[in-house]
Image (cartoon, rainbow, N blue to C red):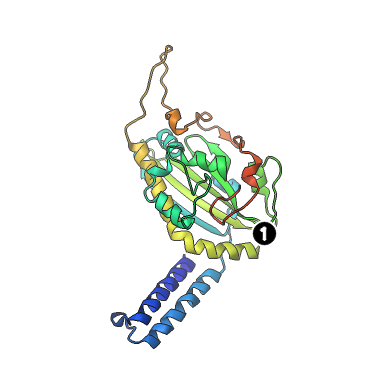
């Protein structure tokens, strides 16, 4: 966090220096253009310092979640949480069903992050009316693990050596075991914990592990610039899940046998998952094209 503050303090100083060269901002103590030039020079210097600060490595000795299994070691992370007044099964269905258009500012922030460039379908350019988790796992992410009503874990690569090609059909274990130099891999989860009062505690955590010092420095510079936007997206993503989970319950219909269906409509791509508590790690028909080519750091991941 200190590195992120350092980077953005430098960007602020850079902006103030540029403005003060045109008209000194005396109310900020920048009383002359010479002083403005000093402020201007100090800005990039502070950005460079923030971008080059070493990232501390964290190790999880006793895994307590599926995310811990796939990302027990990492240098970069962010975690966000909120409470939902809904049972875990409803929160899980909402997590599975929420779309990009339900996430406040998602379109705006992802447009800025890709510099307004159009592109093929991805989590950064999600189509309408399609659950964002489905968009991720059918384009650039692998479904690493899923435990119904409790946790979903997805992952991808954000840095890979030039010319890297994966095996014919990659699996979650391939990503877990990948430790060769030149890579940075990310794992992200949504985890639901019952609060004992009929509600749920919902959290999302993102962890990034760079396999060598060069990749770590490369990703650090990127991470410390995009972190505020990334954090805002994740917070709004949780908020969208809460709004959906706490909204009016899905309509139910009775068949000839009298059974009720509480799954989300097929129109938004919801799929019936494994029974509650049952773990699944199988890759869901994600072809090798999703695990081959890294186009932009943090944008489309495995392609």
Q: Is residue 180 left or right of residue 149?
A: right
Q: Residue pushed farthest top?
A: 256
Quadrant location of residue 53? bottom right
Q: Position of residue 212 (x, y in %)?
A: 66, 62
Residue displayed at 53% across by 30% down: 274
Residue displayed at 40% across by 14% down: 258
Residue displayed at 48% across by 38% down: 150
Quadrant location of residue 216? bottom right
Quadrant location of residue 286? top right
Residue displayed at 58% across by 61% down: 57
> Which residue is disc 1 drawn over?
182
52 and 73: which is toward the camera = 52
116 and 113: which is toward the camera = 116
Secondary element under disc 1, as helix, strand or loop, is: loop
Residue 13 vs 213, above or below: the answer is below
179 and 97: which is toward the camera = 97
Q: Is residue 140 left or right of residue 80?
A: right
Q: Is residue 9 left or right of residue 222?
A: left
């Amino acid at each position: 966090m200190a590195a992120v503050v350092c980077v953005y303090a430098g960007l602020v100083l850079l902006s103030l220096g540029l403005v003060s060269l045109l008209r000194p901002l005396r109310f900020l103590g920048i009383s002359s253009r010479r002083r403005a030039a000093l402020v201007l020079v100090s800005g990039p210097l502070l950005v460079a310092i923030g971008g080059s600060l070493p990232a501390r490595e964290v190790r999880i000795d006793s895994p307590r979640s599926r995310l811990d299994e796939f990302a027990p070691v990492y240098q970069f992370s962010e975690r966000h949480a909120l409470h939902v007044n809904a049972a875990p099964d409803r929160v899980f269905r909402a997590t599975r069903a929420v779309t990009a258009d339900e996430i406040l500012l998602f379109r705006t922030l992802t447009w800025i992050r890709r510099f307004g460039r159009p592109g093929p379908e991805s989590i950064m350019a999600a189509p309408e009316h399609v659950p964002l988790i489905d968009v991720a796992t059918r384009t650039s992410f692998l479904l690493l693990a899923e435990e119904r009503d409790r946790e979903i874990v997805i992952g991808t690569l954000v840095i890979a050596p030039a010319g890297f090609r994966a095996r014919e059909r990659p699996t979650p274990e391939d990503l877990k075991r990948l430790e060769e130099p030149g890579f940075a891999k990310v794992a992200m989860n949504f985890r639901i914990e019952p609060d004992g009062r009929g509600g749920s505690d919902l959290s999302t955590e993102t962890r990034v592990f760079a396999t060598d010092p060069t990749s770590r420095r490369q990703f650090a510079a990127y991470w410390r610039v995009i972190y505020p936007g990334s954090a805002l997206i994740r917070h709004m993503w949780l908020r969208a899940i809460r709004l959906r989970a706490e909204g009016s319950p899905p309509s139910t219909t009775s068949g000839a046998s009298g059974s009720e269906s509480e799954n989300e409509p097929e129109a938004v791509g919801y799929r019936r998952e494994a029974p509650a508590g049952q773990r699944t790690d199988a890759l869901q028909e994600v072809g090798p094209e999703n695990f081959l080519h890294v186009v932009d750091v943090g944008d489309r991941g495995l392609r």
